[in-house]
Image (cartoon, grey):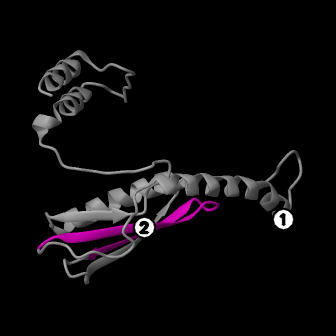
Amino acid sequence: MVYEGTIPSIAHTLSFVMPFLREDDMRLSQICRWLPKIQGQWLALAPNVIKLNFDVAFECQSMRSVYGVTCCDSDGFIMVACSTLHPHVSDAFQVEALACLLAVNFVRGLGFNRVVIEGDFLRFFVSVSYGFVHRKANGAAHVLAQEGKMYSSSKYWMEEAPPNTMLVEDKDRERL
């Protein structure tokens, strides 16, 4: 890497980067004080429920990552596991999001239909959760997805959406 016409030593680069890493660690420790205490051990599940855990090893310089996914039965025994290499990933956030997608596709391909998915993916967030809602409670997003088929590229709206989407959202809000 060239910086201002010179190639800095590893020691110089580390002395520059380390204060930023320490600052991030301080911010993370402050955030973690406010997070709910997270269970640090594996908890048994109801019968016929599968637990899928995923994690990532990311190499920033080579922009390469490896995903690890384990699929356990309700007693905690590994039923299936996979490790997948994924080249050309630009940052850790993208890597974790792709790992979650891989985990979902992995368990879907195995045919399981009662699943708990876990990962240590909190980067940039204080908390993350996912839950199922029936389409009746997800109407505006569904209408927007259907209307999106008409566009030739991605579209973004701030504090508004297409008219049909806004109508569904208004009806949903009236039911609250």
Q: Are marks 2 and 1 in contact (CB under 8 Å)?
A: no
Residue 28 located within the stretch drawn in magenta: no
Give the residue type at disc 1: Ala
**Residue 73 pos. (x, y %):** 20, 78
In the image, the segment drawn in magenta is: 48-71
Q: Which mark is residue 105?
A: none
What residue is at 37 percent from the left and 22 percent from the top? 157
Q: Decide if residue 84 is on the left or right side of residue 25.
A: left
* Label 1 packing within 10 angstroms: few (<14), some (14-19), many (20+): few
Q: Earlier in the sequence, mark 2 or mark 1?
A: 1
Q: Decide if residue 30 is on the left or right side of residue 165.
A: right
Residue bearing the label numbered 2: 55
Give the residue type at disc 2: Asp
* Label 2 packing within 10 angstroms: few (<14), some (14-19), many (20+): many
> Which one is in front, 9 or 5?
9
What residue is at 11 percent from the left and 26 percent from the top? 175
Quick check: 142 above or below 63?
Answer: above
Give the structural element (helix, strand or loop) at label 1: helix
Query: Dividing the picture into quarters, in which one does residue 170 lie?
Result: top left
Residue bearing the label numbered 1: 11
What residue is at 15 percent from the left and 26 percent from the top? 172
What residue is at 25 percent from the left and 81 percent from the top? 76
- Quarter of the image with the C terminus in it: top left
Quick check: 172 above or below 11?
Answer: above
**Residue 21 pos. (x, y %):** 68, 57
> Which one is in front, 103 or 170?
170
For the view shown, which residue lies furthest in the right direction? 6
- Quarter of the image with the N terminus in it: bottom right
For the view shown, which residue lies furthest in the top direction? 163
